[in-house]
Image (cartoon, rainbow, N blue to C red):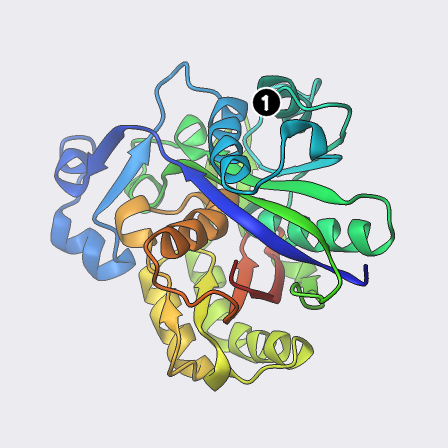
Amino acid sequence: MTGSRILSLGHYQPSRVLTNADLEKLVETNDEWIRSRVGIQTRRIAAEDETVDEMAANAAEKALATSGLSPADIDMVFVATCTAVERSPNTAARVAARLGLGSPAVLDVNVVCSGFTHSLALADHSIRAEAATNVLVIGVDKLSAVTDWTDRTTCILVGDGAGAAVVTASAKPEIGPVLWGSVPELASAVRIGGTPTLFSQDGQSVYRWTTTQLPIIVREACERGGVTPEELGAVVFHQANLRIIEPLARKLGAVNAVIATDVIESGNTSAASIPLAFSKLVEQGQITPGAPVLLFGFGGNLSYAGQIVRCP
């Protein structure tokens, strides 16, 4: 085997829907203000006792169910999250226990919003190095647990959920080389910390960087993957803000691609946003199997990572 491919996808969202009208009762805001600034209409919010590993396991279970593999076949688990409460056992170990996996290596990856694409690259590298054959890659976050519901600049953004991919060894590589990096001087632009632990950000700094520098980096990710923007079947950016996603897609020139806009109905779900949106597009049959898809995450740290993959 000389590479890896995505075998299947799955996603999970909590049942509670929080609308813009609901937020009007919590903070000084309204539907028009929210839509005009971030494009979000609804978001899903986890129950107080619904844990990060529970959501992750639900998404992973769906991905496994359509993969043709058994739980015993999984030999590595990566969980991308920035909202795990306990330090040990880590979220990946908790997911492995919930799913009844055999004896996989279990690693958590905290690169915030680009955690899934970082983890997907690590899974690909592990398979290429013959350290694993079948890897479960999960992005999950419960941002509602670290949200200041009195701050209208951040509480309108967040949602909860999980997305998962089963990655397997392949004679034909279908996960391209990753392009990843960070902007150290903007490392504190997105923060989850303090007492109590809360999410905050310098939205203007993030917006300026994503609208000026990110288009150049995204084009380089396509070049590294050996495709032109015009050849893309789909583009799945981190679902941060519709007012970032739409201009970025236009600047990229992916004129024939389906552009994921799950942020409208799911909000910003951090590490979950890319696999959640990708899984939905595949489930709905909106992407042709085998078509090249750009996955690209950016956000906290200010870290970024992206690669071209083939649609399962």
Q: Residue furthest front?
A: 68
Is 266 above or below relative to 49? below
Q: Please tell me which residue is depicted at 25% across the width and 57% down the height of the picture.
A: 39
Q: Residue 128 falls in which quadrant of the image?
A: bottom right
How far from the left and from the top, in percent, is residue 127? 79, 51
How far from the left and from the top, in percent, is residue 312? 52, 58
Q: Can residue 53 be seen in this snapshot?
A: yes
For the N terminus, the image quarter is bottom right
Q: Can residue 300 be seen in this snapshot?
A: no
In front of the other: 52 or 211: 52
Q: Please tell me which residue is depicted at 69% across the width and 49% down the height of the picture.
A: 168
Is 23 above or below relative to 102? below
Label 1: element kind: helix
How far from the left and from the top, in percent, is residue 241? 36, 58
User: Total marks drawn?
Assistant: 1
92 left or right of 133 in image: left
How far from the left and from the top, in percent, is residue 30? 13, 46
128 left or right of 230 in image: right
Q: Please tell me which residue is depicted at 47% across the width and 65% down the height of the picture.
A: 289
Is 266 above or below relative to 47? below
Q: Please tell me which residue is depicted at 63% across the width and 61% down the height of the picture.
A: 305
Q: Residue furthest top?
A: 49
119 left or right of 84 in image: right
In the picture of the structure, the residue carrying the numbered disc 1 is 99
Report the amino acid beneath label 1: Leu
Q: Residues within 10 Å of mark 1 (few under 14, many from 20)?
A: some
67 left or right of 37 in image: right
In front of the other: 308 or 298: 308
